[in-house]
Image: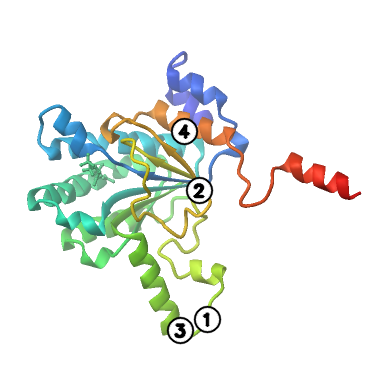
Amino acid sequence: MEKFFNAVKPGTREARLGAEVDPGRLPRHIAVIMDGNGRWAKRRRLPRVAGHRSGIRPVRETIETCAQLGVEYLTLFAFSLENWKRPRIEVETLWQLLRHAIVEELPELQRNGVRLQVIGRIEQLPEAVQRDLDRAMVETSTNRGMQLTIALNYGGRAEIVDAVNAALERGRRVSEVEFAGYLYTAGMPDPDLLIRTSGEMRVSNFLLWQIAYAEIWVTEKYWPDFRRADLVQAIVDYQKRERRFGGVAEAESEEVAAAQR
Ligand code: FPP
C-alpha cells in the first residue's frame, strides 16, 4: 500500500479512505462491470461514443490504484457478446478506443508490473485488435505484479458452454474444481468483490460461475465519473462485510462449539 500513499495527496478523500483499508484483508480479485457510459453522454447531450471516450480515465485510474494497493487480480468487463447489437459506429469506436488505450497505456502497465490477459471469444474480434492484444500480452507476460484481465466478446453462459464442450471432448465427468479448470479464468481465484456502476442491480452475464460468493458493491455513479476514491470506498465497505460462504459467523460457530462441550 506504500505505492498508493505515495501517489495520493494527503488530506484528500482517497487518502482518508486509504487509511481505513486493512492491507492484510484486501480482496485478491476485483471484477468490475463498467456501466453507464451511454447515459453519462446522454445527460450531457453528447453522442454515446463521448461517454466511452470519457470511460478511459477511470479504467486507467482503476488499474493503477489496484496495482498500487496490492490487489492481485483485476477483471474488467469491456465488451459483451451482446454488444455487437449496438450501432456499427459505436462498436467500431469501442475497438478503436481499446486499441489506442492498449498502445498508450502499455508503458504504464510495464511501470506498474501489470500482466495483461483477455477472456472471451477472442478469435471473433477484428484482426487488428487481436494483434495489438497479443503484442501487449507477450510484452507484459513476465511481469510479476497484478494480473489485469479484460473481458472482450465475453458472455458468462457462453463461457460455461465452452467449458462443458471442452470437458466433453476429453470424454470425462468432472468435479467443481476440475470444471473451473476448463473456464477462461482457469488458474485465477474467484472474484471476492464485484463492482458495478450506474446503479443497476444485475450481474449481466458476467463471470456467472466465478461470482458465486462474490460481495457485490453497486454505485449510482456512471462509469466516466468513477474515481479512485470510489474504488477505495468499495474496498473499505467490502472489508466491513462478513463473508460466511454458506457457513455461520465465527462467533456463532464458537457458541455452537461451546454448547456442544
Ligand atoms: C457500458 O456503458 C460500457 C461499455 C459497453 C464499454 C466499456 C468500455 C470502455 C470504458 C472503454 C474501453 C475499455 C478499455 C478496457 C480500455 P453503456 O454504453 O452500456 O452505458 P448505458 O447503459 O448508459 O448505455
Q: Which mark is residue 227?
A: none
Q: CA distance from mark 1 to mark 3?
A: 9 Å
What's the amino acid at mark 1? Arg
Q: Which mark is nearer the camera, 3 or 2?
A: 2
Q: CA distance from mark 4 to mark 1?
A: 39 Å
What's the amino acid at mark 3? Arg
Count of marks placed on residues: 4
Q: Earlier in the sequence, mark 1 or mark 2?
A: 1
Disc 1: which residue: 173
Disc 4: which residue: 234
How crowded is the residue under tag 2: few (<14 C-alpha within 10 Å), some, or many (20+)? many
The answer to whether 157 is drawn above or below residue 87 in the figure is below
**Foreground: 68 or 30?**
30
Location of residue 61 (image quadrant): top left
Extreme residue in the front direction: 259
Q: Earlier in the sequence, mark 3 or mark 4?
A: 3
Q: Which mark is residue 214?
A: 2
What's the amino acid at mark 4? Ala
In the image, residue 16 lies at what x, y percent?
Answer: 50, 19
Q: CA distance from mark 1 to mark 2?
A: 26 Å
Q: Earlier in the sequence, mark 2 or mark 4?
A: 2
Q: Secondary structure at mark 3?
A: loop
In the image, residue 96 lies at what x, y percent?
Answer: 15, 48
Disc 3: which residue: 170
Q: CA distance from mark 2 to mark 4?
A: 13 Å
Q: Secondary structure at mark 2?
A: loop
Q: Secondary structure at mark 1?
A: loop
